[in-house]
């Protein structure tokens, strides 16, 4: 039996590994952009809130933004790692926002925010170790 922390770290590792794999197809810019976004994600959530951060990512709509939405929504909604994909996430914007933000109670919203921040910590650790850095990370 695994702890929630172990499950979270395992999921984050799989997601970062998948980003690494996708970058072989889409090129290094995808990997660098995803790495840069992951490094900023915690600050975005703490500054703007989970709902505003998700709305910002949807509005940007580039592949690396959609990838982060897929990672977060699949983890929070526990629908299985492949329930949401980059291909169908734009179609399911309303569904994701309703479940995670609009229909959530205050307690659920706080839980989703805290859980996302915990996941982001693991994503950032694995991203720093496994992905080519982009943007501000290059100086580390």
Image: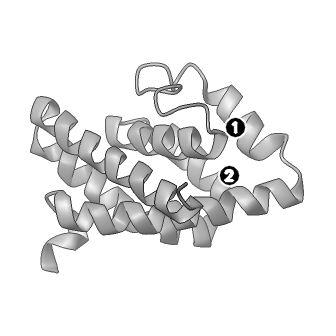
Q: Residue at x 54, y 67 (%)?
A: 118
4 on left or right of 10: right
The relative height of residue 69 versus residue 116 in the rendered view (above or below) is above
Q: Where's the C terminus, which quadrant? A: bottom left
Mark 2 falls on what kind of element? Answer: helix
Front position in the image: 139 or 10: 10
Percent position of residue 42, x then y? 49, 68
Q: Are marks 1 and 2 in contact (CB under 8 Å)?
A: yes
Q: Residue at x 63, y 46 (%)?
A: 76
**Badge 2: few (under 14), some or many (20 or more) residues near its Cα, within 10 Å?**
some
Callout 1: SS: helix
Query: According to the image, label 2 marks what residue?
Result: 51
Position above or below: 85 against 131: above
Nearer-the-camera pick, 117 or 90 = 117
Residue 55 picture location, percent across and down: 60, 45
Q: Is residue 43 visible?
A: yes
Residue, disc 1: 97
Q: Earlier in the sequence, mark 1 or mark 2?
A: 2
Q: Is residue 56 above or below residue 5?
A: above
């Amino acid at each position: 039996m695994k702890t929630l922390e172990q499950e979270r770290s395992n999921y984050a590792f799989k997601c970062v590994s998948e980003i690494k794999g996708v970058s072989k197809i889409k090129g290094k810019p995808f990997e660098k952009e995803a790495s840069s976004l992951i490094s900023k994600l915690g600050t975005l959530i703490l500054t703007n809130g989970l709902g505003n951060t998700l709305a910002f990512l949807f509005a940007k709509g580039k592949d690396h933004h959609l990838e982060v939405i897929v990672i977060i929504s699949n983890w929070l909604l526990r629908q299985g790692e492949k329930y949401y994909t980059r291909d169908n996430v734009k179609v399911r914007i309303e569904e994701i926002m309703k479940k995670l933000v609009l229909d959530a109670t205050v307690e659920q919203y706080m839980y989703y925010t805290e859980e996302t921040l915990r996941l982001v910590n693991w994503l950032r650790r694995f991203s720093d170790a496994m992905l080519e850095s982009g943007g501000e990370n290059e100086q580390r």
